Amino acid sequence: MTSDGVLGQAHRALAGGDIERGSALLRRALMAAPDHAPALYLMGRAELQRGGAAGLAADFLTRSVMALNRGLVEALAGEVFLALGLALRSSGNSGGARAYRRSLLFDPANTQARFNLSNAALDDRNPVAAARLCRQTVIARPDWADGWNNLGRAMIDENRSVRAAISDSDPARDFAGAALRRALVLSPAHRFAANNLGVSHKRLDRVPDAIRQFTHAVCLEPTSVAAQANLGRNLLMSGDLERGWRALEFEKRQTGFTPASGGFSVPVWDGAPIPDGELLIWSEEKVGDDILFAGLLTDLARLAGRLRLLAPPRLVALFRRSLPATISVTPYDGKHAPDCDMSQVRAGYLLEFVGRFVRHSPADFPPPNPYLLVDDALAEPYRAARIPGEMRVGVAWHSINSLIGDYKSQRLADWAEILTIPGLRFYSLQYGDNSAELDEVERATGIRVETPAGIDQMQDLESFAALVSSMDLVISIPNTTAHVAGAIGTPCWVMLPTGPGLSWFWFQESERTVWYRDMSLFRQVEVGVWAPVVKRVARALSQFKG
């Protein structure tokens, strides 16, 4: 029997005049919980009722008051630490999580503190801890939509829904989606749950469902940058370019296209021809994307008398050599004013979004051709070093992209079926220090993937492009290496992820891409499962070699 049940019996016994039975029941309750304020209070009442020693009654009642005060203090302390955590988190201070934990020490039943602690865990990229806290929250408050939304968001981040999709196609196994749908049942206008459910659909490669859900999220909150951007990327991926561009650039249209710290200010271009002035286009230091979208600049230049491109310094030489004379290329670091005369600039736009003016539908893409030219003087030593009859294959397998790099990346050791095809010579085109992985592969397979000396793939893009041009074939994940190979016309096979790691510009389903002529795409079928893709590439490589 619970202590509350014992107290109820004791209270009834005292009310009926059975002081001894009542006192005995209360002693049992106090043995289990010596500081239980209601039991101490009733013991004091029992002593007064008995007419015994007043001091004993006073002792019990005093202890009851002290227990009540202690409970009030603990509850107040819990609320104080909860408020402190909110203040610290709002100011960007990392001490918010510690304050929430102190709040729970004083008041373990405070679901708001537990909920806030789950938010802090998500901020700290600890989705496992966040999901655990969220489960505790929804158990305590099953009717709280915010708790279910947080649980769904945490499950997305810890990939529970992805693993469920791989192991079982039953939609009920989509745990993240189930939690988010529960949130929307409880609160149909919950804008965060609506957007997160769209993310869950995208991560399971359900693009039509994602588009419907992000559209709903935008209807709930038209000014949501996250929902608009998510909607835009998925519309673009589906081939709906007109609506996709408009949604994707929503944030820029709200805040202005001119970089806040870029050192210049120009009117935003509306797409109208500029025959008597200069059109300014600038990038935001996304090298792979910059190379991809540079393929649109020749078409774009036809809409202006002159076009000036502000490009990352490491791309300037490559772009200057390759782009038409009507396009001026100026170094730009994104922080300081560009060193050029901008007096003739009439309007400007961000390179990432210029496609909206020249690519309104997939039918607007012309047959692609290489558009970047390597420095022959840099490429000649690599070409001259070829062994007669050899076939060179460059490989790149890893991405450091903070958002989707893990979904795109693979272990080179898992490419053994590719690397052990005889008669091929493999070269690492992977940036960074990869010596440990290369040694591991050599120990396991006996194959040494060579690393050309003196190449900095991240900074010396001129030399890197020259090296790539000396390859007979490049096999890569979708990173900068793939874009360099595609833009200069080196045959390239790209192993594409599905679901969360797939960028919109790879579109869906096709084995070819509208961006690059000599590129083939090998797509994942199941999210996170690379082995079948590697097997298809190995089979194709055996035929390619033959």
Image: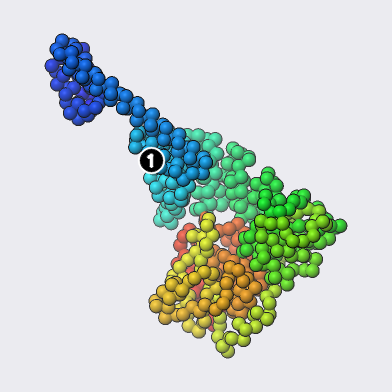
Which residue is the site of mark 1?
101
Relative vertical location of residue 74 with respect to residue 348 in this rendering, above or below: above
Q: Position of residue 14 (x, y in %)?
A: 19, 14
Residue at the (69%, 61%) spot, across then down: 332
Give, as a three-letter code, the residue at label 1: Arg
Quadrant location of the C terminus in the rendered image:
bottom right
Few, some or many C-alpha atoms within 10 Å of disc 1 (few <14, some 14-19, many ≥20)? many
Relative vertical location of residue 178 with respect to residue 414 in this rendering, above or below: above
In the current view of this chain or complex, which residue is farthest to the bottom? 388
In the current view of this chain or complex, which residue is farthest to the front? 55
Relative vertical location of residue 483 with respect to residue 423 in this rendering, above or below: above
Residue at the (52%, 57%) spot, across then down: 402
Q: Position of residue 71 (x, y in %)?
A: 32, 27
Give the quadrant of residue 141. Answer: top left
Quadrant location of the N terminus in the rendered image:
top left
Residue at the (77%, 49%) spot, across then down: 267
